[in-house]
């Protein structure tokens, strides 16, 4: 069972190690620390009952009520057990609570597993970015409404969520 909580400074080294073993770019702990300073509540970790890190998601605030998912990974030994979905859902709820409208991210165009994951969460590809990565790799920029209202329609009024919205 994964326990989810907001990250703190004691998590920086472990989150950095997880990202460096999961993503094909290397990050300094300063990068993770920067995200933590910039938006403390947008950093979420999943751990086991012994406090071992299982996964993490690091968000960053953009302008105009948007955020980006800057770093996101689950330990390879624990993938496919729903931890990524739980982390993402906790992140999405946090965005909702803070009045954020849109989430976006960049994903390597060859990372089909991650793209499938994001698409299943309601993200759509909005741009192809040539040479986005330092090694010359391309990326897709993907975006989703926090409310999961993919057509961009507003949420129904409070208390009327179950009444349909045609
Ligand atoms: C993307 C990632 C965070 C998902 O975490 P996870 O804990 O494995 O995800 P879940 O177990 O919640 O799976 C959610 C869904 O995605 C699918 N999925 C997740 N990883 C997958 C993979 N590697 N291959 C195929 N499908 C995958 C699952 O089958 C599941 O689908 P379902 O709900 O229809 O069963 C994880 O695969 C990961 O760390 N990848 C490497 C790092 C990475 O690419 N990060 C994104 C950078 S933009």
Image (cartoon, grey):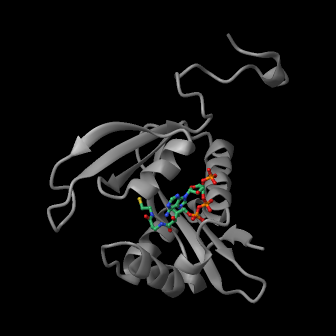
Question: In the displayed structure, does residue 76 sit left or right of residue 34?
Answer: right
Q: Position of residue 12 (x, y in %)?
A: 51, 82
| Residue 61 shows in the view | no
In this rendered view, identify the residue nearer to me: 109 or 91: 109
Taking the image in four quarters, ligand 1 sits in the one at: bottom right
- On the rendered structure, is 131 left or right of 67? left
Q: Position of residue 17 (x, y in %)?
A: 45, 85
Q: Position of residue 62 (x, y in %)?
A: 41, 48
On the image, the x and y values in percent for residue 101 come to: 54, 36
**Residue at x 66%, y 87% (from the top left corner):** 52
Q: Who's the residue at 67% across and 24% down the image?
A: 155
* Total count of labels: 0
Q: Is 103 positioned to the left or the right of 148 in the image?
A: left
Task: Look at 68% across and 59% down and name the residue there.
Answer: 86
Q: Please indicate, yes or no, whether residue 44 appears anywhere in the rendered image.
A: yes
Camera-side residue of 77 and 97: 77
In this rendering, the answer to whether 71 lies above or below 152 is below
């Amino acid at each position: 069972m994964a326990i989810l909580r907001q990250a703190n400074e004691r998590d920086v080294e472990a989150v950095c190690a997880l990202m460096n073993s999961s993503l094909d770019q290397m990050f300094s702990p300063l990068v993770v620390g920067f995200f933590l300073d910039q938006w403390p509540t947008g950093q979420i970790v999943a751990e086991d009952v012994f406090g071992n890190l299982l996964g993490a998601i690091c968000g960053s605030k953009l302008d105009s009520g948007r955020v980006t998912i800057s770093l996101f990974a689950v330990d390879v030994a624990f993938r496919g057990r729903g931890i990524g979905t739980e982390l993402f859902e906790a992140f999405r709820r946090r965005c909702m609570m803070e009045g954020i409208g849109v989430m976006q991210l960049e994903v390597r165009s060859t990372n089909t597993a991650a793209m499938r994951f994001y698409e299943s969460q309601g993200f759509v590809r909005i741009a192809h970015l040539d040479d986005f990565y330092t090694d010359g790799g391309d990326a897709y920029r993907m975006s989703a409404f926090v409310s999961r209202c993919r057509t961009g329609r507003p949420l129904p009024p409070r208390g009327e969520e179950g009444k349909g919205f045609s």
